[in-house]
Amino acid sequence: MPNRTDAQLSRDIAREAGALLVSMREAHGNLEDWAVADRLRDRADKASHELLVAALGAARPHDEVLSEEGRRDDPARVGANRVWIVDPLDGTWEYGQGRADFAVHVALWENATVLASTVDLPAQGVVRSVLDEDAVPAALPIDRPIRIVASRTRPPEALGAAVALLSDRLAAAGITTQGAEVIDVGSVGAKVNEVISGRAEAYVHDTGFYEWDVAAPLGVAVHYGYNASHVDGSTVTFNHTPPYVTDFMVSHPSITELLMTAMKDAS
């Protein structure tokens, strides 16, 4: 499609990569065999990376690309004004397990701003993009606890204590007496989608990951009206060397301050 905007390009190629990942998994062998599943992960990561890089190279030949699967991180991208930050397969482990909580991330970092963000969740049939209309935060739940999404393998050490504090403060603020609880999901994109979908109200991670994990989910979360920042509320920036993000939090605006202070007080 000629003359696509950056956002349209981002959405289109994320969808194409997601469809490729699904088709490769459907055509593969028995995923209960660890060696078979591991080979699929490697092949799928590489194939999705090659698709995204080729598409961006054809459509935006003067832009830089930072990808998890890139064999060489070109130093030129650090001084570039336009850098595409992509994760060809976020949630690689979940993908190889046959699960649905994996994603493709595509975002553009331009003029110190995350733009053109897309999170494609192909096994769920869901695409989140800055092109989505009526993108507003879901209503807070009245029939269940406030849910905080965290990594199943690396949850914040202080999260248990923070959730206990948050439960008390939510009640004191008249927001809910249902308390708060922690759930786990795979990909960062899938975690943020749980929040956007109204099945959870926040996502917290404080043990570090890479820019390609965070850029597109952050851009989409902001588009939907959620807070997306470091755990202390400071702004997350990108295109660094190394491309590392120390911590990240997405939260419903109605609970952001309570969650931040609970995390701080629990630490």
Image: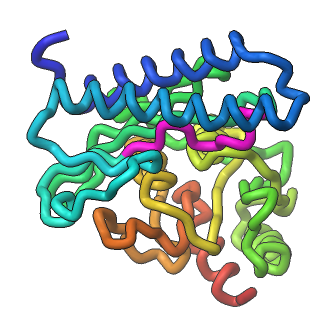
State the image coordinates of residue 181 (x, y, percent, origin top left): 84, 59
Q: Residue at x 13, y 58 (%)?
A: 80
Please say if 31 is above or below 205.
Answer: above
Q: Nearer the viewer, residue 163 or 67?
A: 67
| Rendered image quadrant of residue 57 | top left
Outermost residue on the right side: it is: 32
Q: Is residue 88 magenta?
A: yes
Q: What span is in magenta?
A: 86-96
**Count of numbered tags:** 0
From the viewer's perspective, is 77 left or right of 20? left
Q: Position of residue 146 (x, y in %)?
A: 77, 55
Viewer-proximal residue, 60 or 144? 60
Q: Does residue 17 appear left or right of residue 174 in this picture?
A: left
Residue 243 is left or right of residue 204, and the answer is left
**Vertically, is 99 above or below 166?**
above
Q: Which residue lies at the image location 80% right of the left edge and 71% below the top edge?
A: 163
- Asked if residue 99 can be seen in this view, the reply is yes
Residue 148: where, in percent of width, then height?
Answer: 73, 58
Quick check: is 57 in the magenta stretch? no
